Image (cartoon, rainbow, N blue to C red):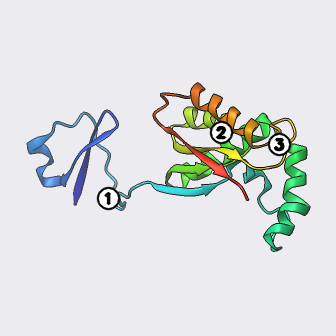
């Protein structure tokens, strides 16, 4: 039977409940007797906007899935709104599942960063680098990396965002 002391969103102590009154004056108490305290989960590989493509053309080899289904759909549907709304859905699902941090690689990463900032989750967001043009997003690796650098500058100082270079074979 233990208690967690939180102040200003930070954990100050974890101690036996019997010792709580000796050391801390509670402003508020929440009793959760049939619960466990666990660390937040990390989803290390996501393409959050693809939450909208879940269940599309399952159970086929990866290359065939990408070339015959996913890439044509992405080319047709993908833009800032698709990415933002798909990321919003994925972030809500992750938060509900106990995920506190995710690593993402997708087109229009600035829209994903906007979702992260609004939601309170943490993310490492990839600046994509792949050698083919993708619709309105960009023409190739140099263009994608330049956009990524601008995104990084825009969100500089956001404590819940970090950056990766996301290479795609």
Q: Residue at x 18, y 53 (%)?
A: 15
Dot 3 or dot 2: first in sequence order is: 3
Q: Classify residue 27 by image quadrant.
A: top left
Kindly tell me whether residue 111 is visible in this rendering. Answer: no
Q: Quadrant of residue 67?
A: bottom right
Residue at image x 67%, y 49%?
48
Q: Earlier in the sequence, mark 1 or mark 3?
A: 1
Determine which residue is flagged by label 1: 33
For the C terminus, the image quarter is bottom right
Classify mark 3: helix, strand or loop: loop
Q: Position of residue 53 (x, y in %)?
A: 79, 55
Give the number of the mark in front: 2 or 1: 2
The reply, left or right, for residue 146 in relation to residue 123 is right
Counting residues from the N terminus, which is met first, the one under dot 2 or under dot 1?
Answer: 1
> How far, Cα to Cα, is label 3 from label 2?
13 Å
Q: Is residue 166 left or right of residue 10?
A: right
- Vertical comparison of 127 with 19: above or below: above
Please tell me which residue lies in front, 134 or 72: 134
> Which is nearer the eye, 41 or 3?
41
> Image quadrant for the N terminus?
bottom left
Looking at the rendered structure, the number of numbered marks drawn on it comes to: 3
x and y percent of residue 119 in the render?
56, 37
Circle number at residue 112: 2
């Amino acid at each position: 039977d233990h208690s967690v002391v939180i102040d200003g969103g930070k954990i100050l102590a974890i101690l036996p409940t019997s010792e709580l009154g000796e050391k801390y004056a509670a402003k508020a108490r929440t009793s959760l007797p049939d619960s466990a305290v666990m660390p937040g989960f990390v989803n290390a590989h996501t393409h959050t906007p693809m939450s909208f493509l879940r269940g599309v053309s399952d159970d086929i080899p990866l290359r065939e899935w990408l070339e015959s289904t996913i890439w044509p759909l992405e080319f047709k549907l993908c833009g800032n709104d698709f990415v933002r709304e798909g990321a919003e859905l994925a972030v809500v699902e992750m938060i509900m599942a106990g995920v506190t941090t995710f690593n993402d690689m997708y087109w229009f990463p600035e829209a994903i960063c906007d979702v992260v900032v609004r939601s309170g989750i943490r993310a490492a967001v990839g600046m994509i680098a792949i050698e083919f043009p993708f619709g309105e997003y960009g023409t190739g690796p140099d263009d994608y990396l330049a956009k990524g650098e601008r995104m990084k500058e825009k969100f500089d100082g956001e404590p819940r965002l970090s950056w990766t270079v996301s290479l795609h074979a």
